Amino acid sequence: MQKAADASQNSAAGAAEPIIEVRGLWSVFPTAGGGQVVVHKDLDLTVRRGEVLTLVGGSGTGKTVLLRQMLGLNRPARGQVTVLGRPVAELTDAGAAARVGMLFQQGALFSAFSVLDNIALPLRETRAVPDALAREAALLKLQMVGLKPGDAHKMPAELSGGMIKRVALARALIMDPPLLMLDEPTAGLDPDSSDAFVALLRSLHRELGLTVVMVTHDLDTLFELSDRVAVLAEQRVIVCAPVPEVLAFDHPFIRHFFLGERGQRAMELLRTRHRDGEKGQ
C-alpha cells in the first residue's frame, strides 16, 4: 500500500517545484499516564508550487498537527520539514510570517483590535514598513477579500461569521506570502457564505499564484478547490493524488468519507454546478 501511495504522489505531482517537503516525520506526544502516543510515523509528503493540496483523515490522524509542523509551531520527534527550501525550524517569526500565511478555523481575531489593526498586526509586529504604509497595505488587503473601507474600523464583535473569515484571510495575506495554510476555512458558515468564501479563495489562488495547504471536512469545499488530496491514516499519508485517483484507492476511510451518502451528495452538487456553468458560457 505504501508503494502505491508513493507512486500516486510522484505521478500526480508532476515536475512542479516542491514548496514543502516532509520526510520521515514522527509526531509523538506524552500521555497523562507517562506513556506516549504516536500520531505520525515515517510520514512523507510533498506540496508543489501553485497547487491546492487538501489534508483529510479521521479523528486523531493529526491533520492540524501536520499543519503546525509545517508552520514550525510543533517540532517533530524525528524527521524533517522543509518549507521553501529551508528547514522550518530555522525560520524566525518574521521570516515565517513573510513566507507562510495561516487562516485559523475560528479566525483568531484579537477582540480588542479593530479590523484594520488586526490585518496590519503582522506588519507592525515585524516592523517591516512604517505604520502609515502598514495601514495602507491593510486597507488594500481588506478590499482584496471583498470588504469595504468602511469596515476597517469595526470591531470583531460587530462582524458576521463570513466577515471574520475574510478579515482573517486578509491578515494571513498581509505579508504577501507565497504559501497559505487553511484550517477548516468554511467551518461555521452558512451555505451561501461558504460558497462565496470558496469562490474568493479560488480567485485569490489564481490571481496571486498561491500554494495552498488546506484541512477541511467539508466535501463541497474539497471538491471545488483541491488539485490533490492527501489522505492521513495508519499514522501516515496512504495516498496523495487528484480526487478521482483517491476515490479509486481502496481503503475503509476513503469508502466512508468520499463514497458514503454525504460524499455522493457533494459530488452530485459539484457536477450540477459544472453543468450549469457550462450552459451559462
Image (cartoon, helix red, strand yellow):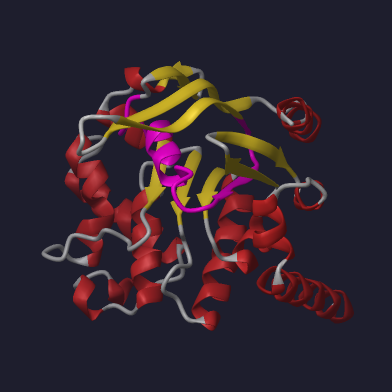
253 sits to left or right of 25: right
Q: Residue at 24% across / 65% down in the picture?
A: 115
Figure quadrant of residue 89: top left
Q: Residue at 56% across / 55% down in the picture?
A: 204
Q: Residue at 46% across / 61% down in the picture?
A: 185
Magenta-span inclusion, residue 19: no
Q: Position of residue 239 (x, y in %)?
A: 69, 38
Image quarter in which the C terminus is found: bottom right
* Residue 140 shows up from this direction: no
Q: Is residue 39 above or below residue 164?
A: above
Q: Is residue 163 above or below residue 55?
A: below
Residue toward you, 44 or 20: 44
Magenta-span inclusion, residue 74: yes
Residue toward you, 78 or 174: 78
Provide the residue span drawn in magenta: 46-75
Q: Is residue 149 above or below residue 229?
A: below
Image quarter in which the N terminus is found: top right
Q: Position of residue 182 (x, y in %)?
A: 46, 51
Q: Residue at 25% across / 48% down in the picture?
A: 134
Q: Is residue 158 above or below residue 125?
A: below
Residue toward you, 82 or 32: 32
25 sits to left or right of 207: left
91 sits to left or right of 19: left
* Residue 113 shows up from this direction: yes
Q: Position of residue 181 (x, y in %)?
A: 46, 46
Figure quadrant of residue 240: top right
Q: Position of residue 10 (x, y in %)?
A: 76, 27
